[in-house]
Amino acid sequence: MPELTHTADGYSATFRAMGSPCAVLIDSHDAALSCALGEEAEAEALRIEAKYSRYRADSVLSAINASGGTPLAVDDETANLIDYAAQCHALSDGLFDITSGVLRRVWRFDGSDRVPSAASVRAILPLVGWNKVAWRRPWLTLPEGMELDFGGLGKEYAVDTAVMKLAAMTDRPFLVNFGGDLRASGPRADGGRWRVAIESVETPEQSEALLELAEGALTTSGDARRFLLKDGVRYSHILDPRTGWPVKDPPRAVTVAAPTCLEAGLLSTLAMLQGRRAERFLRREGLQAWWVR
């Protein structure tokens, strides 16, 4: 059950899910309503985690990854996510690829200097590439040894579905924040904006900036917590699925505003995947974005 805290601005309901601290801020002094909203958000986060976690043997994702080349029919929700991922792959010229998670077998971004050999990266590349997957809704055929990973979609999707569920329960303003991926249902009741702190890339426990959000979503992609450092070279955890190596010279962090968390998450990730061309990409797309070099 979420922990409910009463403040001058209303209530916050906090809990942990998907390996992250989560919170719902409710612009209301109604304790019963706030508790119900917090419980609904937690239930939705845990549902998505259970369904799409690669760490759970009973998850839908684990069943897909264990299919070993046998065609598998997936449910509508999973099919919608796969359709979205396939569209992202096409729009990004292959930079966004949900089969690239298998690269974690050789890359472990733990802040150490353990950079894998070129040979080990080359050996795993045959298991990467959405174009190798047969997808004709609802049937998915994943070649032996390949995996899908919704790590770049799951938390953002959970925020969006939680917002929809909570909006059906109340017309009071609220903000859902799952591990820094967040979305506001609308302006605060007095017309004011939600104040959102962006963590520092140098000291993650501190704030880099304070943004104001009236409505919509914010997500941040960066390497403050996940990187390798060897011989003075910092290796970002943002991997190019076409080469199996970290993109060159990406920003330390990119924050993007968009109507939904799924959109914001895709755009912030795509910006990081542009490497040194990230700022040019953000300006060309006319996005509301902030970045740190």
Image (spheres, rainbow, N blue to C red):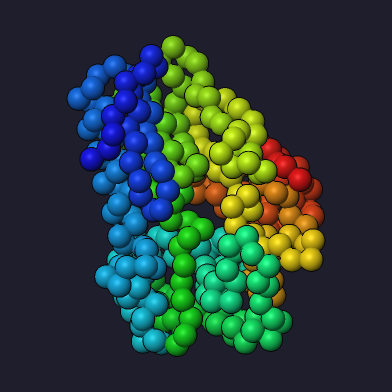
Question: What residue is at 32 percent from the left and 68 percent from the top?
Answer: 56
Displayed quadrant of residue 264 = top right
Q: Position of residue 220 (x, y in %)?
A: 58, 45
Between 24 and 183, the residue placed more toward the observer is: 24
Q: Residue at x 59, y 83 (%)?
A: 124
Image quadrant where one finds the C terminus: top right
143 to 212, vertically: above or below: below
- Give the percent coordinates (x, y) of residue 217: 51, 38
Residue 15: horizontal and vertical position, in percent?
Answer: 33, 41
Q: Is residue 84 above or below residue 25?
A: below
User: In the displayed structure, does residue 55 sit left or right of residue 241?
Assistant: left
Q: Does any portion of residue 237 appear in the rendered image?
A: no
Using the rendered image of the protein, determine whether residue 97 is visible from the camera's viewpoint. yes
Task: Report the side of 221 relative to 142 (left or right).
Answer: right
The x and y percentages for residue 83 are 46, 63
For the residue pair 77 and 51, the one nearer the viewer reads as: 51
How many numbered markers are drawn? Answer: 0
Q: Quadrant of residue 11?
A: top left
Q: Residue at x 31, y 62 (%)?
A: 51
Position of residue 169 in the picture relative to residue 104 (left or right): left
Q: Quadrant of the N terminus?
A: top left
Looking at this view, name the residue that lies furthest to the left: 32
